[in-house]
Amino acid sequence: MGVDKLANQDYQDLSIEQERKVARTLMGRIEWEMIVIGLGQCALWVVIWSLVVQSIIPLWAGFLMSTITTAFSYLPSHAGQHGHLSGKHKNLKWLNSVVGQISLIPLAQAHDVLKATHLKHHAHTNDPERDPDYGHTHVDHWWQSALNVHLQTGTDGKLAKMVEEFSVEDPSFKQAMERGGLFSMLFLFAQMVVVVFYPLETLVLWWLPRKLATSFIGIFFSMEPHSKLPKGRYLDTRFWSNGMPRFFNHSMQIHVMHHMYPNICHFDEPKAIEALLPFMIERGIPGADKVPERVKLNSLLTNFSS
């Protein structure tokens, strides 16, 4: 039975089994949109550097353009972390790590490290002792999230302790962190070399956009969807809105769909919500009762509690 027929039927059966049956119809495709974004934004970032170095465009324009492209560098890696770039095609699994890592060049981050910690975030969402994102998620103000996301060891050392515990408990986590550590060292070396030849450009085109984009990710990917919510599959993520079009928030207003079924591609989340909305309301997902029947490109509703 196709997703359209499932979405249009009368929902008499709101069981977990039926919910999963509907969700499975939306899984498994190659998310080509993220491949295009991942490679495209990185290529554009390199072009911006070239244009600034050759004095074709001014440094301030390069800064603005670089900040925008860098803000799009995490989403493709995130898709790769969940296997969306290869879909159900096992022979294409390499796309997840290759495209994911290329996309992260403007952020100077290691795909393996982000994947390892992000999967732990999914496994322990909103757990103060086990969620790697907790320190920049459960805060009182957006500026606290923007600052805390840069404190890699956590404001109180909790993140470092989590990483140590996960490394002992989970050999695959430890291996991923070790692989990612090599990329982290490579990025550090690359920035040290580039700054010698282009000190001002490195500051304005790489360092500062990376910091701003990381703060953006901390606020919209972590704090807004999860802040001050409890643990629990159907309770740890909310629908929310700040009145801006979803595009400018990377559709994080509907991030709850991702936590409900991480194997559904980012660009398929609107139709997934339309198909699964009766189940979401039945499960008591925060904000689900305010979601319209049709999820459009604009923000969902301006009266969501954030």
Image (spheres, rainbow, N blue to C red):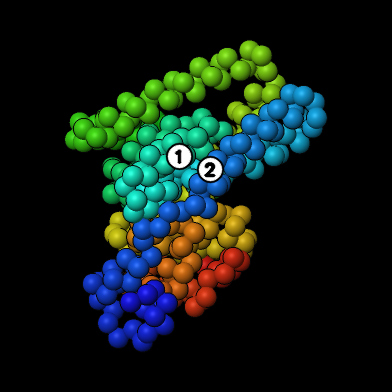
Q: Quadrant of residue 210?
A: top right
Q: Residues within 10 Å of mark 2 (few under 14, many from 20)?
A: many
Q: Earlier in the sequence, mark 2 or mark 1?
A: 2
Answer yes or no: do the residues labelled 2 and 1 have beta carbons within 8 Å?
A: yes
Q: In terms of depth relative to the viewer, which is nearer, 202 or 234?
A: 202
Quadrant placement of the N terminus: bottom left
How far apart are the alpha carbons under marks 2 and 1?
A: 7 Å
Question: Residue 45 placed where, x, y %?
Answer: 63, 35
Tally of numbered discs: 2
Q: Which mark is residue 238?
A: none
Q: Which mark is residue 38?
A: 2
| Left/right of residue 258 with respect to residue 36 in the rendered view | left
User: Where residue 219 sits in the image (x, y, percent)?
Assistant: 52, 48
Q: Residue at x 37, y 84 (%)?
A: 9
Q: Is residue 264 left or right of residue 247?
A: left
Given the image, on which type of amino acid does mark 1 rest?
A: Gly
As helix, strand or loop, the secondary structure at mark 1 comes to helix
In the picture, measured across the screen, residue 220 lies left or right of residue 22, that is right
Task: Give the residue number, with chain letter if any, for mark 1.
Answer: 100
